[in-house]
Amino acid sequence: MAEIDLGVIDLGIGRPHHAVLPVAEISAASLRVAAGGSRDGLQYGPDPGMYDLRSLLAHFLSAQYGLEVRSQELVMTYGASHALDLVLGRYTQPGDTVLVEDPTYFFALDVLRGRGVRPIPVAMDQQGIVPDDLRQQLRTHSPRLLYTVPTFHNPTGIVHTSARRQEVVALTKEHDCWIVADEVYHLLCDGTRPKPLRAYSADNVLSISSFSKILAPGLRLGWVEAAPRHIDQLLQCGVFRSGGAASPYVSSIVEEVITLGDLDRVLIGLRTFYADRMRGVVAALRHELPAEVTFEDPGGGFFLWLRAPATVDFEHLRDRARDMGVDYRAGSLFSCHGSFANCLRICCTYYSEQETREGIVRLGQFLRRTFS
Ligand SMILES: Cc1ncc(COP(=O)(O)O)c(C=O)c1O
């Protein structure tokens, strides 16, 4: 059994556990690429991405989504973060407004700000985006885009319901606002969950995703899936004109992983791993947390969102938590107006099961002391 690090266990870190990174599958695929002797992966590739990878990925996504994805609807990127930046670069000007969920993925806020775009918060509840607030913000700001994380939302873990997905798509369409759906966690859920957002409108939604959560973030390979007219727009970007396809060599390795059937196998393993991990974390939290702190069980994904009474400010309490050997991400980090100071996000995937359990024990001690 691994020794528990007696330093700070940072439950805020939103990364996969080392043990799930598929080193054997990537090594096998890399050896096959090297043995094949092709120089294609060492040359500049076509702007939308390597042809074989896009067609394998289109086939894979079609089977996973139960929805046709065509290779012409895909442009490969250096990850979902790059995909978001790419979309913002083509579709916004500095000073434009973009609607974001409140709370939202905090690094997405950085990407928006990096493009000089003003994020406008839209309220969420347990079902997803609140339609009345969305309507109001669409009317007030006439935004070009809405950025949303519809499945295993970061930071709340919420999976938006089908009814909400439908309503949000309909409302944004009415107001000529496109949706950027960040679906990096979508494939971690099983087939009983709502479909990806393009199922509700193929034209209005640009889906961004990557191999970061389904294979390994270090591959730095992702994609935008959108209607051909959007793909044509995105390909006007100078980065593709100058550099060609995103990562041809890594693409050739991922092609092999898919061809060998390893992506399917890895994904099945990950779903079980993360679902088990979430079950364990939820049970531990129910045991350790004081009554003042509540949460909903997301049923999977990476994140849990803990809520305390409104008078609490978890950013201010972080040093005290660290003194007690545990850390988290304070809720205010995820809000463009600094709301949710009384909430915190933890991730249940980065540490081993034993270390995570110890982190939750420490979190419970810290919270019980805070409320005693
Ligand atoms: C919602 C969300 N989008 C994007 C990313 C980053 O994705 P990528 O590694 O593909 O850039 C993360 C990583 O934590 C995330 O949580």
Image (spheres, rainbow, N blue to C red):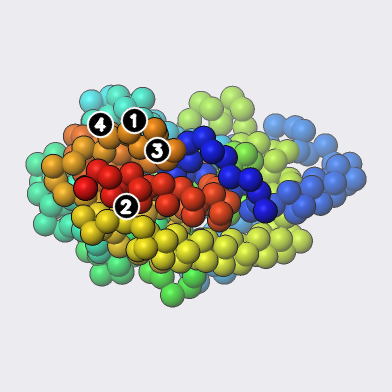
Disc 4 marks a residue whose amino acid type is: His
Q: Which tag, 1 or 3, sits closer to the chain's start?
A: 1
Q: Nearer the viewer, mark 4 or mark 3?
A: 3
For mark 2, what is the residue?
A: 305
For mark 4, what is the residue?
A: 316
Confirm if mark 1 falls within 8 A of ligand 1. Answer: no
The answer to whether residue 215 is visible is yes
Dot label at residue 324: 3
For mark 1, what is the residue?
A: 319
Which residue is pictured at 16% across the width and 58% down the height?
A: 131
Up the image or down, 27 lies above or below 284; here it is above
Q: Nearer the viewer, mark 1 or mark 2?
A: 1
Disc 1 marks a residue whose amino acid type is: Asp
Q: Quadrant of residue 248?
A: top right
Q: Which tag, 1 or 2, sits closer to the chain's start?
A: 2
State the CA–CA distance, disc 4 to disc 3: 14 Å
Q: Nearer the viewer, mark 4 or mark 2?
A: 4
Q: Which tag, 4 or 2, sits closer to the chain's start?
A: 2
Which residue is pictured at 79% across the width and 47% down the height?
A: 27
Disc 2 is placed on an element classified as strand
Neighbor class of circle 4 (other Cα within 10 Å; few <14, some 14-19, many 20+) is few
Q: 167 or 104, which is in the foreground? A: 104
State the CA–CA distance, disc 3 to disc 2: 20 Å
Q: Which tag, 4 or 3, sits closer to the chain's start?
A: 4
| Residue 137 drawn at (x, y percent) | 13, 45
State the CA–CA distance, disc 1 to disc 4: 7 Å
| In this rendering, position of residue 15 left or right of residue 247 | left
Neighbor class of circle 2 (other Cα within 10 Å; few <14, some 14-19, many 20+) is many
Q: Which tag, 3 or 2, sits closer to the chain's start?
A: 2
